[in-house]
Each structure stands twice: as structure tokens, then as C-alpha cells.
Amino acid sequence: MTEPAYDYDLFVIGAGSGGVRASRIAAGYGARVAVAEEYRVGGTCVIRGCVPKKLLVYGSHFAEELQDAASYGWTVEKMTFDWPTLRDAVAKDVDRLNAAYTNTLNSNKVEHFLERATITGPNSVKLASGREISARYILVAVGAWPVMPPFEGAEHCITSNEVFSLEKLPRRVVIAGAGYIALEFAGIFNALGSHVTVVNRSETILRGYDAALRDRLLQITMARGIEYKFNCGIERVERLEDGCLNVHMKGQPDPLGADAVLVATGRRPKTDGLGLENAGIELGEHGEIRVDDTAQTSCPSIFAVGDVTNRVQLTPIAIREGHAFADRVFGGKDTRVAYDCIPSAVFSQPPLASVGLTEAQAREMLGSNVKVFTSDFRPMKNIFAHRHERGLYKLVVDAQTDKVLGVHLIGPEAPEVLQAAAIAVKAGLTKADFDATVALHPSMAEELVLMR
Ligand SMILES: Cc1cc2nc3c(=O)[nH]c(=O)nc-3n(C[C@H](O)[C@H](O)[C@H](O)COP(=O)(O)OP(=O)(O)OC[C@H]3O[C@@H](n4cnc5c(N)ncnc54)[C@H](O)[C@@H]3O)c2cc1C
Ligand SMILES: NC(=O)c1ccc[n+]([C@@H]2O[C@H](COP(=O)([O-])OP(=O)(O)OC[C@H]3O[C@@H](n4cnc5c(N)ncnc54)[C@H](O)[C@@H]3O)[C@@H](O)[C@H]2O)c1
């Protein structure tokens, strides 16, 4: 397979979700593979994304569990929370996973260089140490990076990169943005006892999710004490002598006092300074690498997967794209990634989860040929704990074919319930199939088969 002129069959830039999967699968097909990683093997998801975030969600969720425990007969005395304990335990688990991912590379005979790589030509890269390497194919899997809008005092703010290593739990947190990261961390900090203000430039939270779920999340989180400032942007952040921050917002006379300002206004493909011009690689308007449906860039020997292509910024998609690339280029299989019916979840508190078309999307496509079924219910565990929060489940159905086009859930454990429902939507099952399925009682998931 190897043309002797090249040092490797495949050189991967970025050992994150997409890069590690592609390296491992390509090596399994007998390719000689090397990967460069400028920070830590594992990438965003493992090091400063999905995994540490989910552990913080678990950690903060005890506040609710402990509060509700009294209704179930438990007496919890002197309930206190220690941020450094949780922070350091999460960091330790990240170290464990970092080692596990490094082992995966080693055991699959993927050579790795812990340094930055840049592209110098269609078949060559240069490492930060100055070493030049040639490869028959190059895979760019460098991910994305938080966007920091250019306001005065931005240097006093943090992004999701820094939020996991805060020295102290901030008493007051201002969060800019109202997307995934903003609402997940709003939930975490609120549950841990911080006062949270979400500042968003529009009135829309979680664009792309079903409107009924978004409204429910707003209602519940406001009742839990999260404040929202809509149609409002940060103009300037100043650090006061006592270390506190003043957040000045456009059109608001008084600044907000804060101990931390988390900016979560999207992530941009990490293509700056990567040397893409040396191989004639075309970029899109957001700095993303343009690829075709085989992940090939405008340079035939260079491919790109994951967040750097800015298609769907989710770990399972980066993994699938990396796997499909290796299957096609080294395994002789024409594997393609299907982008329909991608399930997703926001680990807010409560979480929401969704697959397929929202009601608005379905109505835009099918006009009046859409049926919507909802279950607006109070989970049994909430009733017992005198917690007034309600769950909301919604099925969007094609009225002509009876196919379930979308499932949208908010409530405890919604992501766990949604994954199984996503199989049904992907398989094209009908509302009649849902109705014909016997309920699993007592559960929240049974609502899915009881909506009439
Ligand atoms: C806070 C947060 C929470 C998230 N939660 C979820 C979630 O719950 N579920 C979900 O599905 N997704 C989640 N995501 C998104 C998910 O992490 C990404 O979609 C996924 O990691 C993308 O994988 P990737 O391989 O494209 O890039 P990454 O995993 O980002 O890997 C890219 C790697 O390339 C390295 N690199 C960059 N440039 C170079 C270079 N020039 N040389 C060498 N190395 C380089 C980087 O250091 C990085 O390790 C979250 C993201 C964030 C930020
Ligand atoms: N649970 C998950 O699967 C999960 C969790 C976290 C992140 N992610 C992925 O990471 C990506 C990045 O997350 P994110 O929350 O940073 O982005 P996002 O796209 O979800 O949200 C960005 C938010 O910032 C606002 N915004 C954008 N530019 C702004 C500006 N200049 N000023 C003020 N507000 C601005 C937007 O209106 C939006 O509310 C997500 O799109 C998602 O794909 C996934």
C-alpha cells in the first residue's frame, strides 16, 4: 500500500474524536499512521467538552436529589458543597481517559507526536519542532475553538476551555449566549448555588429545538432562579480593584456585578495558521474546510472530518466521519455518513433531547399534513417530592403516511429516553407502531406510547 516516497500512508492532524477513530481504523487496515496533537490526546469531548461537562452535571444534580430526599424520608444534615473536590475529581477522570486514548493509539500502532502540525503541501506537514513529514494522505481533524466577540475587557472573561479549572466557585456568573454550552453551564452553576444571568443577543434560546420545549426550559429555569437578559449584548467588562467584574451591556444603564463571565457564543473551525493555503484547500465563509460527501477537500490527498468542517458539531458525528474516511480510503468500503435523524440533547436542568423534524420544520415542509401529539405530565418522582416541574413529550407525525417525523422531550433523563426513540424514527416507524407497543410501567418513557 505504501509508496516508498512517503513516511506514512496517513498523517492525522488532531487526536480528538474524529482523528483518533480514523487513525485506529486506518491502522487496523494495515496503513502506517501517525497523528499530531498540540494539546492532549482525546480532544475537546474528552478533555474539555462532553465528558467533564457531563460529570459536572451529575455532580451539580445532587443538589436537587438531596433537596427531594427529605420527601422520601432521608435527613441530610449539614449539606455542603466543595468545588475543588468536584473539579479535581473530574480532572482526574479526564487524566484517566487521556491515558486510555493514548493507549488506544499505542495498541493500534499509531505513532503520535505531542506537538502542533501545519500543512506545507499536498503530501507534507511540519511539526512545531521543525521536523518535516510526508504522507500519502493527510486528514485534518483539528476541531473548533470558542469564539470571543471583540468587546473591551474580553480578556477578563472565560470560555468553556477555562471553566473546568476555576479556582473558586463563582458566587455570581454572567453567561453570554443561549446555546448548548450557555444553558448547560447555567444549569450547573445554578444547581451549585451561584447566581446565574444569561445574556443573549436575541430572544431565542437553543435555536433549532422545538419551540414548546424551549419555552418549557425557560419557564422551569426562571423558576429555579436563572435570570435572562434578552436582546442584549455585552459592551464592556471591567475588573474592579477587589477582583470582581462589572459587565456593561448595550442599552442597560446599570452594569451587572459578576465573579466570572463565561462567553459561550459558538465555536469556530480551528483553521487559522494551519497552512491550508499551501495545499490550495478551500474554506467556507465561517472558516470551515469545504469537503464533499467523502470528506475530501479541494486538494485530493487531503481530507477533513469533525468540527473543522462545521457540519454538525457533535462527537458521534466526528467519530462516524473519521470511521467512514478510514473505511473508504484504506478499507475499500464505500461507507458514507447519513446526516438525517441525528439525535441530540442539551444537558440543561432539566435536560431536553430531540430527533427529527420539529413541529415548525414539519409544517414548513408538509403544510397542514402534520399531526402533533403531546404529553404534558408531572413525573411521578416530582409529584412525590412536591416539585412542580412538568415534563413535556411531543411526537410530530406525517398525517398522510403516519410516519413519526420527530420526537422532542424535556424532563428528567430525557436524553436516556430519546436514544431508543431515535431508533424508531430512523427506522421510519409509524404512530400506529408506537401505539401498538405495550407501555413499560411505571416510567416516564411510557408516555411515548400512550399519546392519543
Ligand atoms: C463544553 C463542550 C461540551 C460539549 N458537549 C458535547 C456533548 O455533550 N455531546 C456531543 O456530542 N458533543 C459535545 N461537544 C462537541 C464535541 O466535543 C465536538 O463536536 C467533538 O469533540 C469534535 O471532534 P473533532 O474530532 O472534530 O475535534 P476535537 O475533539 O476538538 O479534536 C481536535 C484536536 O485537534 C487538536 N489540534 C488542533 N489544531 C492542531 C494542530 N495544528 N496540530 C495538532 N493538533 C491540533 C486539538 O488540540 C484537539 O485535541 C461539546 C463541546 C464543548 C466545547
Ligand atoms: N450537548 C451537546 O451535544 C453539546 C454541548 C455543548 C456544545 N456542543 C456543540 O458545540 C457547539 C458550540 O456550542 P455553543 O453553545 O458555543 O454554540 P451554540 O451555537 O449552541 O450557541 C451560540 C449562542 O451564542 C449566541 N451568539 C452568537 N454570536 C454572538 C455574539 N457575537 N454575541 C452574543 N451572542 C452570540 C447565539 O445566539 C447562540 O445563542 C454547539 O453548536 C454544539 O454543536 C454540543
Image (spheres, helix red, strand yellow):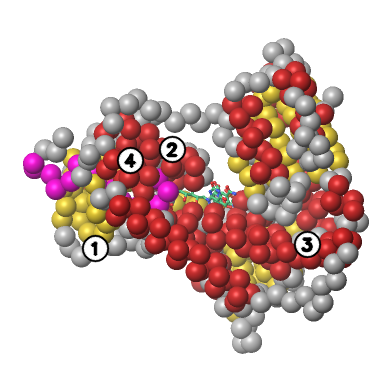
Decide: marks 1, 3 in contact (CB < 8 A)? no
- Magenta region, residue range: 4-18
Examine the structure image and report whether residue 16 is included in the region drawn in magenta.
yes
Label 1 sits on residue: 128
- In this figure, what is the number of numbered marks? 4
Residue at 21% x, 51% y: name it: 125
Residue found farthest to the bottom? 241
- Which numbered disc, 4 or 3, marks the residue that appears first in the sequence? 4
Label 4 sits on residue: 25
Q: Which mark is residue 320?
A: 2
Q: Disc 1 vs disc 3: which is toward the camera?
A: 3
Label 3 sits on residue: 64
Q: Look at the image and tell me in which quarter the N terminus lies.
A: top left
400 or 431, which lies in front? 431
Is the residue at mark 3 in contact range of ligand 2, meaning its CB lies under 8 Å from it? no
Which type of secondary structure does the marked residue at label 3 adopt? helix
For the residues labelled 1 and 2, the Cα–Cα distance comes to 29 Å
